[in-house]
Amino acid sequence: MLKRRHVLSMKDFSREEIDEILETAESLEPYARGKGSDILDGKILALMFFEPSTRTRMSFETAMKRLGGMTINLGSAEASSIAKGESLADTIRVVGGYADAIVIRHPKEGSARLAAEFSPVPVLNAGDGAGHHPTQTLLDLYTIKKESHLDDLSIALVGDLKYGRTVHSLAYALSLYGADIYLVSPPTLRMPEQIIGDLSRMGTRVREVSDLREVIEEVDVLYITRIQRERFPDPVEYNRVARSYSINTRDLEGAKPELRIMHPLPRVDEISPSIDGTKHAVYFRQSFYGVPVRMALLKMILED
Amino acid sequence: MAERELKVRPIRSGTVIDHIQAGQALNVLKILGISGTTDATVSVIMNVGSRKLGKKDIVKVEDRELREDEVNKIALIAPGATINIVRDYAVVEKYTVDLPDVIVGVVRCQNPSCISNTNEPIKPKMLVKGKNPVVLRCFYCDQPLTERIAEYLL
Protein backbone atom coordinates (compact mmCIF):
# COMPACT_ATOMS: atom_id res chain seq x y z
CA MET A 1 0.00 0.00 0.00
CA LEU A 2 2.73 2.46 0.96
CA LYS A 3 5.38 0.77 -1.12
CA ARG A 4 7.82 3.33 -2.60
CA ARG A 5 5.43 6.16 -1.65
CA HIS A 6 6.34 9.58 -0.31
CA VAL A 7 5.13 10.61 3.16
CA LEU A 8 4.63 14.37 2.95
CA SER A 9 1.41 15.34 4.71
CA MET A 10 -1.32 13.65 6.76
CA LYS A 11 -3.75 14.78 4.09
CA ASP A 12 -2.23 12.14 1.79
CA PHE A 13 -3.60 9.35 4.03
CA SER A 14 -7.05 7.82 4.31
CA ARG A 15 -8.37 6.52 7.62
CA GLU A 16 -7.82 2.94 6.39
CA GLU A 17 -4.19 3.68 5.54
CA ILE A 18 -3.61 5.26 8.95
CA ASP A 19 -5.15 2.22 10.64
CA GLU A 20 -2.85 -0.07 8.71
CA ILE A 21 0.23 1.97 9.72
CA LEU A 22 -0.82 1.91 13.39
CA GLU A 23 -1.45 -1.85 13.28
CA THR A 24 1.92 -2.46 11.66
CA ALA A 25 3.55 -0.29 14.34
CA GLU A 26 1.93 -2.39 17.04
CA SER A 27 3.26 -5.60 15.49
CA LEU A 28 6.75 -4.07 15.40
CA GLU A 29 6.86 -2.90 19.01
CA PRO A 30 8.86 -5.93 20.25
CA TYR A 31 11.47 -5.12 17.60
CA ALA A 32 11.46 -1.46 18.63
CA ARG A 33 12.40 -2.69 22.12
CA GLY A 34 15.39 -4.61 20.84
CA LYS A 35 14.24 -7.95 19.43
CA GLY A 36 16.47 -8.33 16.38
CA SER A 37 15.21 -7.99 12.82
CA ASP A 38 16.90 -7.90 9.44
CA ILE A 39 13.97 -7.16 7.14
CA LEU A 40 15.65 -3.99 5.85
CA ASP A 41 19.10 -5.56 5.63
CA GLY A 42 21.11 -3.78 2.94
CA LYS A 43 18.80 -0.76 2.76
CA ILE A 44 20.11 2.74 3.37
CA LEU A 45 18.14 5.67 4.79
CA ALA A 46 19.49 9.20 4.27
CA LEU A 47 18.86 11.69 7.07
CA MET A 48 18.84 15.31 5.90
CA PHE A 49 18.18 17.65 8.80
CA PHE A 50 18.62 21.30 7.90
CA GLU A 51 17.22 22.26 11.31
CA PRO A 52 17.96 20.95 14.80
CA SER A 53 16.15 17.80 15.91
CA THR A 54 16.67 15.29 18.68
CA ARG A 55 13.69 12.96 18.84
CA THR A 56 12.75 12.84 15.18
CA ARG A 57 16.28 12.33 13.87
CA MET A 58 17.32 9.81 16.51
CA SER A 59 14.10 7.81 16.37
CA PHE A 60 14.29 7.54 12.57
CA GLU A 61 17.87 6.36 12.96
CA THR A 62 16.88 3.88 15.67
CA ALA A 63 13.91 2.65 13.61
CA MET A 64 16.08 1.97 10.57
CA LYS A 65 18.80 0.22 12.55
CA ARG A 66 16.35 -1.89 14.57
CA LEU A 67 15.09 -3.27 11.25
CA GLY A 68 18.60 -4.16 10.11
CA GLY A 69 19.06 -1.17 7.80
CA MET A 70 21.72 1.54 7.74
CA THR A 71 21.65 5.32 7.83
CA ILE A 72 23.75 8.03 6.23
CA ASN A 73 23.73 11.57 7.48
CA LEU A 74 23.90 14.94 5.81
CA GLY A 75 25.48 16.31 8.97
CA SER A 76 25.24 20.01 9.56
CA ALA A 77 24.26 22.15 6.57
CA GLU A 78 27.31 24.36 7.17
CA ALA A 79 29.65 21.42 6.58
CA SER A 80 27.92 20.28 3.38
CA SER A 81 27.67 21.61 -0.16
CA ILE A 82 24.58 23.59 0.92
CA ALA A 83 27.06 26.09 2.33
CA LYS A 84 28.47 26.43 -1.19
CA GLY A 85 25.06 27.49 -2.43
CA GLU A 86 23.81 24.21 -3.88
CA SER A 87 20.05 24.12 -4.34
CA LEU A 88 17.90 21.73 -2.36
CA ALA A 89 16.78 20.19 -5.65
CA ASP A 90 20.35 19.30 -6.63
CA THR A 91 21.24 18.05 -3.15
CA ILE A 92 18.19 15.78 -3.17
CA ARG A 93 19.02 14.37 -6.61
CA VAL A 94 22.54 13.56 -5.43
CA VAL A 95 21.56 12.01 -2.09
CA GLY A 96 18.76 10.09 -3.82
CA GLY A 97 21.51 8.26 -5.68
CA TYR A 98 23.09 7.13 -2.41
CA ALA A 99 20.06 5.94 -0.45
CA ASP A 100 16.82 3.96 -0.70
CA ALA A 101 14.77 6.66 1.04
CA ILE A 102 15.30 10.19 2.34
CA VAL A 103 14.10 11.79 5.57
CA ILE A 104 14.14 15.58 5.39
CA ARG A 105 13.58 18.43 7.84
CA HIS A 106 13.92 21.88 6.34
CA PRO A 107 12.90 25.38 7.51
CA LYS A 108 11.01 26.29 4.32
CA GLU A 109 7.38 25.31 3.92
CA GLY A 110 6.77 23.00 0.99
CA SER A 111 10.41 21.86 0.94
CA ALA A 112 9.49 18.18 1.36
CA ARG A 113 7.12 18.36 -1.59
CA LEU A 114 9.84 19.96 -3.67
CA ALA A 115 12.23 17.21 -2.56
CA ALA A 116 9.69 14.59 -3.63
CA GLU A 117 9.56 16.14 -7.12
CA PHE A 118 13.31 15.73 -7.59
CA SER A 119 14.01 12.59 -5.60
CA PRO A 120 14.38 9.21 -7.32
CA VAL A 121 13.52 7.53 -3.99
CA PRO A 122 10.70 7.99 -1.42
CA VAL A 123 10.84 11.14 0.72
CA LEU A 124 9.60 11.27 4.31
CA ASN A 125 8.80 14.74 5.63
CA ALA A 126 10.19 15.24 9.13
CA GLY A 127 8.94 18.83 9.37
CA ASP A 128 8.89 21.62 6.77
CA GLY A 129 8.89 24.92 8.65
CA ALA A 130 5.39 25.70 9.89
CA GLY A 131 4.03 23.18 7.38
CA HIS A 132 3.61 19.46 7.95
CA HIS A 133 5.14 16.87 10.24
CA PRO A 134 3.17 13.72 9.44
CA THR A 135 5.26 11.19 11.35
CA GLN A 136 4.70 13.21 14.55
CA THR A 137 0.95 13.03 13.97
CA LEU A 138 1.11 9.29 13.32
CA LEU A 139 2.98 8.71 16.57
CA ASP A 140 0.49 10.92 18.41
CA LEU A 141 -2.37 8.84 17.02
CA TYR A 142 -0.53 5.67 17.99
CA THR A 143 -0.03 7.00 21.51
CA ILE A 144 -3.73 7.83 21.84
CA LYS A 145 -4.66 4.39 20.52
CA LYS A 146 -2.29 2.61 22.92
CA GLU A 147 -2.78 4.72 26.02
CA SER A 148 -6.41 5.77 25.58
CA HIS A 149 -8.76 5.14 22.65
CA LEU A 150 -9.24 6.66 19.19
CA ASP A 151 -12.98 6.03 18.96
CA ASP A 152 -15.32 8.37 20.86
CA LEU A 153 -12.35 10.36 22.03
CA SER A 154 -12.70 13.64 23.90
CA ILE A 155 -9.46 15.61 23.68
CA ALA A 156 -8.28 19.07 24.69
CA LEU A 157 -5.51 20.68 22.63
CA VAL A 158 -3.76 23.19 24.90
CA GLY A 159 -1.26 25.99 24.32
CA ASP A 160 -0.04 27.48 21.04
CA LEU A 161 -2.73 26.42 18.58
CA LYS A 162 -1.86 29.10 16.04
CA TYR A 163 1.68 28.25 15.01
CA GLY A 164 1.94 24.70 16.34
CA ARG A 165 2.03 22.55 13.21
CA THR A 166 1.60 19.34 15.17
CA VAL A 167 -1.77 20.33 16.59
CA HIS A 168 -3.11 21.34 13.19
CA SER A 169 -2.41 18.04 11.53
CA LEU A 170 -3.39 16.11 14.66
CA ALA A 171 -6.75 17.88 14.69
CA TYR A 172 -7.33 17.01 11.02
CA ALA A 173 -6.41 13.38 11.63
CA LEU A 174 -8.62 13.12 14.74
CA SER A 175 -11.54 14.39 12.74
CA LEU A 176 -11.27 11.18 10.66
CA TYR A 177 -12.02 9.33 13.90
CA GLY A 178 -14.94 11.53 14.98
CA ALA A 179 -13.25 12.99 18.05
CA ASP A 180 -14.70 15.81 20.17
CA ILE A 181 -12.04 18.52 20.26
CA TYR A 182 -11.65 21.31 22.81
CA LEU A 183 -9.25 24.12 21.95
CA VAL A 184 -7.65 25.80 24.96
CA SER A 185 -5.35 28.69 24.12
CA PRO A 186 -4.49 32.32 24.85
CA PRO A 187 -6.53 34.67 22.62
CA THR A 188 -3.48 35.60 20.54
CA LEU A 189 -2.61 31.96 19.85
CA ARG A 190 -6.03 30.64 18.80
CA MET A 191 -6.33 28.01 16.13
CA PRO A 192 -6.78 29.66 12.70
CA GLU A 193 -10.44 30.09 11.70
CA GLN A 194 -9.85 28.29 8.44
CA ILE A 195 -8.81 25.11 10.25
CA ILE A 196 -11.72 25.28 12.70
CA GLY A 197 -14.03 25.70 9.69
CA ASP A 198 -12.49 22.70 7.92
CA LEU A 199 -12.87 20.55 11.03
CA SER A 200 -16.50 21.56 11.50
CA ARG A 201 -17.26 20.79 7.87
CA MET A 202 -15.77 17.34 8.41
CA GLY A 203 -18.36 16.82 11.14
CA THR A 204 -16.05 17.31 14.11
CA ARG A 205 -17.40 18.98 17.24
CA VAL A 206 -14.93 21.77 17.99
CA ARG A 207 -15.26 24.11 20.96
CA GLU A 208 -12.93 26.89 22.05
CA VAL A 209 -12.43 27.59 25.74
CA SER A 210 -9.92 29.83 27.49
CA ASP A 211 -9.68 27.93 30.77
CA LEU A 212 -8.70 24.29 31.04
CA ARG A 213 -10.79 23.91 34.20
CA GLU A 214 -13.96 24.15 32.11
CA VAL A 215 -13.19 20.85 30.38
CA ILE A 216 -10.81 18.94 32.66
CA GLU A 217 -13.55 16.62 33.95
CA GLU A 218 -14.67 15.63 30.47
CA VAL A 219 -11.58 14.88 28.47
CA ASP A 220 -9.76 11.60 27.92
CA VAL A 221 -6.56 13.22 26.65
CA LEU A 222 -4.81 16.53 27.26
CA TYR A 223 -2.44 17.37 24.43
CA ILE A 224 -0.14 20.16 25.64
CA THR A 225 2.10 22.18 23.33
CA ARG A 226 4.87 24.61 24.04
CA ILE A 227 4.19 28.34 23.94
CA GLN A 228 7.21 29.75 22.20
CA ARG A 229 8.95 32.79 23.61
CA GLU A 230 9.61 34.20 20.15
CA ARG A 231 5.85 34.60 19.52
CA PHE A 232 5.75 37.40 22.11
CA PRO A 233 7.49 40.73 21.53
CA ASP A 234 7.05 41.55 25.23
CA PRO A 235 8.85 39.18 27.66
CA VAL A 236 6.54 40.20 30.52
CA GLU A 237 3.52 39.19 28.48
CA TYR A 238 5.21 35.92 27.52
CA ASN A 239 5.88 35.08 31.17
CA ARG A 240 2.29 35.85 32.14
CA VAL A 241 0.76 33.74 29.38
CA ALA A 242 3.23 30.87 29.70
CA ARG A 243 2.60 30.67 33.45
CA SER A 244 -1.16 30.66 33.03
CA TYR A 245 -0.92 27.76 30.58
CA SER A 246 1.38 25.57 32.62
CA ILE A 247 -0.16 22.48 34.18
CA ASN A 248 0.47 21.13 37.66
CA THR A 249 -1.23 18.47 39.76
CA ARG A 250 -3.75 20.98 41.19
CA ASP A 251 -5.07 21.66 37.69
CA LEU A 252 -5.98 18.00 37.38
CA GLU A 253 -8.52 17.99 40.22
CA GLY A 254 -11.74 16.37 39.02
CA ALA A 255 -10.03 14.74 36.03
CA LYS A 256 -10.93 11.20 34.99
CA PRO A 257 -8.59 8.62 36.54
CA GLU A 258 -7.79 7.40 33.02
CA LEU A 259 -6.90 10.90 31.74
CA ARG A 260 -3.71 10.83 29.65
CA ILE A 261 -1.41 13.83 29.22
CA MET A 262 0.62 14.08 26.03
CA HIS A 263 3.28 16.55 24.83
CA PRO A 264 5.37 16.41 21.64
CA LEU A 265 8.42 17.57 23.67
CA PRO A 266 10.66 19.38 24.30
CA ARG A 267 8.76 20.91 27.19
CA VAL A 268 9.90 23.98 29.06
CA ASP A 269 7.48 24.98 31.81
CA GLU A 270 4.19 23.73 30.37
CA ILE A 271 4.03 20.58 32.48
CA SER A 272 5.23 20.57 36.07
CA PRO A 273 7.71 17.75 36.81
CA SER A 274 5.34 16.81 39.66
CA ILE A 275 3.07 15.29 37.01
CA ASP A 276 5.81 13.07 35.56
CA GLY A 277 5.32 10.36 38.18
CA THR A 278 1.54 10.19 37.88
CA LYS A 279 -0.25 7.61 35.76
CA HIS A 280 -1.61 10.48 33.65
CA ALA A 281 1.81 11.28 32.16
CA VAL A 282 2.51 9.45 28.90
CA TYR A 283 4.79 11.95 27.13
CA PHE A 284 7.96 9.93 27.51
CA ARG A 285 6.27 6.78 26.23
CA GLN A 286 4.89 8.98 23.44
CA SER A 287 8.42 9.83 22.32
CA PHE A 288 9.34 6.12 22.42
CA TYR A 289 6.35 5.32 20.19
CA GLY A 290 8.04 7.34 17.49
CA VAL A 291 10.28 4.32 16.97
CA PRO A 292 7.67 1.62 16.17
CA VAL A 293 5.63 4.10 14.10
CA ARG A 294 8.66 5.11 12.00
CA MET A 295 9.65 1.43 11.75
CA ALA A 296 6.19 0.70 10.36
CA LEU A 297 6.54 3.43 7.71
CA LEU A 298 10.05 2.34 6.71
CA LYS A 299 9.00 -1.31 6.51
CA MET A 300 5.90 -0.53 4.43
CA ILE A 301 7.80 1.79 2.08
CA LEU A 302 11.08 -0.09 1.69
CA GLU A 303 10.45 -3.81 2.13
CA ASP A 304 10.99 -5.79 -1.06
CA MET B 1 -24.31 39.99 -33.12
CA ALA B 2 -20.63 40.73 -33.65
CA GLU B 3 -21.41 44.36 -34.25
CA ARG B 4 -23.25 44.73 -30.97
CA GLU B 5 -20.44 43.15 -28.96
CA LEU B 6 -17.77 45.25 -30.60
CA LYS B 7 -19.82 48.39 -30.45
CA VAL B 8 -17.18 50.95 -29.50
CA ARG B 9 -15.21 50.55 -32.68
CA PRO B 10 -14.62 47.33 -34.54
CA ILE B 11 -10.94 46.48 -34.88
CA ARG B 12 -9.48 45.12 -38.06
CA SER B 13 -7.40 42.42 -36.44
CA GLY B 14 -6.27 41.49 -32.98
CA THR B 15 -7.97 40.42 -29.79
CA VAL B 16 -11.06 41.66 -28.02
CA ILE B 17 -11.40 40.62 -24.41
CA ASP B 18 -14.99 41.00 -23.38
CA HIS B 19 -16.99 40.35 -20.20
CA ILE B 20 -14.15 41.39 -17.93
CA GLN B 21 -15.36 41.96 -14.38
CA ALA B 22 -15.77 45.73 -13.99
CA GLY B 23 -12.64 47.30 -12.56
CA GLN B 24 -10.23 44.61 -13.77
CA ALA B 25 -9.38 46.04 -17.22
CA LEU B 26 -6.16 47.65 -16.01
CA ASN B 27 -5.07 44.41 -14.38
CA VAL B 28 -5.72 42.63 -17.65
CA LEU B 29 -3.36 45.09 -19.34
CA LYS B 30 -0.80 44.45 -16.62
CA ILE B 31 -1.02 40.71 -17.20
CA LEU B 32 -0.59 41.23 -20.92
CA GLY B 33 2.50 43.29 -20.23
CA ILE B 34 1.00 46.35 -21.88
CA SER B 35 2.20 49.56 -20.29
CA GLY B 36 2.22 53.20 -21.29
CA THR B 37 5.21 52.63 -23.56
CA THR B 38 3.48 50.16 -25.85
CA ASP B 39 3.30 50.79 -29.60
CA ALA B 40 0.11 48.76 -29.96
CA THR B 41 -3.25 50.44 -30.36
CA VAL B 42 -5.17 49.55 -27.24
CA SER B 43 -8.70 50.50 -26.27
CA VAL B 44 -9.86 50.18 -22.71
CA ILE B 45 -13.56 50.48 -22.05
CA MET B 46 -14.63 50.48 -18.45
CA ASN B 47 -17.97 50.13 -16.72
CA VAL B 48 -20.03 49.39 -19.79
CA GLY B 49 -23.57 48.19 -19.12
CA SER B 50 -23.87 44.42 -19.40
CA ARG B 51 -26.92 42.22 -19.17
CA LYS B 52 -24.84 39.36 -17.78
CA LEU B 53 -22.60 41.23 -15.34
CA GLY B 54 -24.41 44.51 -14.67
CA LYS B 55 -21.22 46.34 -15.52
CA LYS B 56 -18.20 45.08 -17.39
CA ASP B 57 -14.87 46.15 -18.85
CA ILE B 58 -13.63 45.49 -22.38
CA VAL B 59 -10.06 45.54 -23.68
CA LYS B 60 -9.16 45.63 -27.36
CA VAL B 61 -5.63 44.98 -28.49
CA GLU B 62 -4.99 45.54 -32.16
CA ASP B 63 -2.66 43.34 -34.23
CA ARG B 64 -2.05 40.88 -31.45
CA GLU B 65 -3.62 37.43 -31.06
CA LEU B 66 -3.41 36.23 -27.50
CA ARG B 67 -1.58 33.01 -26.79
CA GLU B 68 -3.11 30.41 -24.52
CA ASP B 69 -0.79 31.04 -21.56
CA GLU B 70 -1.77 34.70 -21.62
CA VAL B 71 -5.41 33.72 -21.68
CA ASN B 72 -4.95 31.54 -18.61
CA LYS B 73 -3.52 34.47 -16.74
CA ILE B 74 -6.53 36.61 -17.52
CA ALA B 75 -8.84 33.95 -16.10
CA LEU B 76 -7.14 34.46 -12.74
CA ILE B 77 -8.51 37.97 -12.33
CA ALA B 78 -11.38 37.97 -14.83
CA PRO B 79 -13.04 34.56 -14.77
CA GLY B 80 -15.78 34.41 -17.37
CA ALA B 81 -14.03 36.82 -19.75
CA THR B 82 -14.49 35.98 -23.42
CA ILE B 83 -11.73 36.14 -25.99
CA ASN B 84 -12.51 37.16 -29.56
CA ILE B 85 -9.79 36.74 -32.13
CA VAL B 86 -10.47 39.14 -34.97
CA ARG B 87 -9.10 38.97 -38.51
CA ASP B 88 -10.29 41.35 -41.23
CA TYR B 89 -13.12 42.62 -39.05
CA ALA B 90 -14.51 39.12 -38.52
CA VAL B 91 -14.43 37.14 -35.30
CA VAL B 92 -12.64 33.98 -36.37
CA GLU B 93 -12.36 32.46 -32.95
CA LYS B 94 -14.31 33.03 -29.76
CA TYR B 95 -14.03 31.30 -26.43
CA THR B 96 -14.45 31.83 -22.73
CA VAL B 97 -11.31 31.85 -20.67
CA ASP B 98 -11.09 28.80 -18.50
CA LEU B 99 -8.60 28.15 -15.75
CA PRO B 100 -6.77 24.85 -15.98
CA ASP B 101 -6.59 22.71 -12.83
CA VAL B 102 -2.94 23.63 -12.37
CA ILE B 103 -1.21 26.91 -13.16
CA VAL B 104 2.56 26.86 -13.45
CA GLY B 105 4.82 29.89 -13.62
CA VAL B 106 2.10 32.55 -13.64
CA VAL B 107 1.42 33.55 -10.06
CA ARG B 108 3.72 33.20 -7.09
CA CYS B 109 2.90 32.02 -3.57
CA GLN B 110 2.16 34.78 -1.05
CA ASN B 111 3.87 32.85 1.76
CA PRO B 112 7.36 34.35 2.17
CA SER B 113 8.51 31.14 3.89
CA CYS B 114 7.48 28.94 0.96
CA ILE B 115 10.25 27.01 -0.79
CA SER B 116 8.89 28.27 -4.12
CA ASN B 117 9.98 31.81 -3.16
CA THR B 118 13.64 30.81 -3.01
CA ASN B 119 16.30 30.17 -5.64
CA GLU B 120 15.25 26.59 -6.33
CA PRO B 121 15.05 25.61 -10.02
CA ILE B 122 11.25 25.45 -10.06
CA LYS B 123 8.38 27.59 -11.25
CA PRO B 124 5.64 28.45 -8.77
CA LYS B 125 2.79 25.99 -9.12
CA MET B 126 -0.78 26.73 -8.07
CA LEU B 127 -3.63 24.26 -7.81
CA VAL B 128 -6.97 25.76 -8.83
CA LYS B 129 -9.49 24.93 -6.09
CA GLY B 130 -12.24 27.28 -7.26
CA LYS B 131 -12.82 29.08 -10.55
CA ASN B 132 -15.39 31.76 -9.79
CA PRO B 133 -14.36 33.24 -7.43
CA VAL B 134 -10.82 32.06 -8.06
CA VAL B 135 -9.30 30.08 -5.19
CA LEU B 136 -5.70 28.99 -5.60
CA ARG B 137 -3.60 26.81 -3.34
CA CYS B 138 0.18 26.59 -3.51
CA PHE B 139 1.24 23.11 -4.63
CA TYR B 140 4.27 23.26 -2.37
CA CYS B 141 3.15 24.80 0.93
CA ASP B 142 -0.70 24.60 0.71
CA GLN B 143 -1.08 28.35 1.33
CA PRO B 144 -4.36 29.57 -0.20
CA LEU B 145 -4.52 32.67 -2.40
CA THR B 146 -7.94 34.19 -3.03
CA GLU B 147 -7.71 37.96 -2.88
CA ARG B 148 -5.34 40.43 -4.51
CA ILE B 149 -4.20 37.75 -6.93
CA ALA B 150 -3.09 40.46 -9.36
CA GLU B 151 -0.37 41.52 -6.89
CA TYR B 152 1.23 38.09 -7.06
CA LEU B 153 1.40 37.77 -10.83
CA LEU B 154 4.92 37.11 -12.04
Image: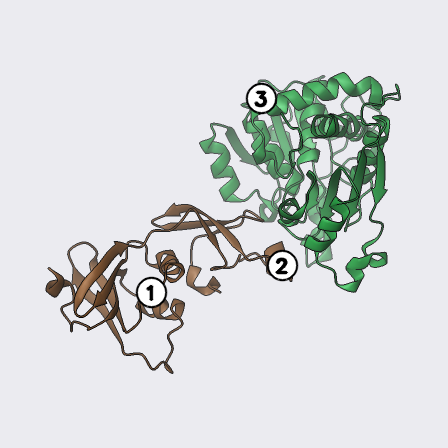
Chain B pictured colour: brown
Image depth: mark 3 or mark 1 in front: 1
Badges 3 and 1, same chain:
no
Q: Is residue A97 left or right of residue A5?
A: right
Nearer the observer: mark 3 or 2; the answer is 2
Kindly identify the residue that appears in the image at 68 percent across and 22 percent down.
A22
From the top left corner, tell me how far across and down residue A79 is, in percent: 86, 57
Q: Please check whether the numbered discs 1 and 2 fall on a single chain.
A: yes
Tell me, what hue is chain A?
green
Q: Which residue is mark 3?
A: A16
Closer to the camera, A241 or B136? B136
Instruction: Check contact, mark 1 vs mark 2: CB within 8 A.
Output: no
Residue A11 seen in render: yes
Residue placed at 54% from the left, 48% from the top?
B139
Sequence-wise, which precedes: disc 1 or disc 2?
Answer: 1
Residue at mark 1: B66
The kind of residue on which mark 3 rests is Glu
Name which quarter of the figure residue A136 lies in.
top right
Circle 3 packing at 10 Å, graded few (<14), some (14-19), many (20+), is few
Pinpoint the chain carrying mark 1.
B
Q: Nearer the viewer, residue A271 or B124?
A: B124
The residue closer to the viewer here, A5 or A241, is A5
Q: For this view, does A79 lie left or right of residue A126? A: right
Amino acid found under the numbered disc labelled 1: Leu
Say the numbered circle drawn on residue B121: 2
> Alpha carbon of mark 3 to alpha carbon of mark 2: how far?
36 Å
Q: Amino acid at mark 2?
A: Pro
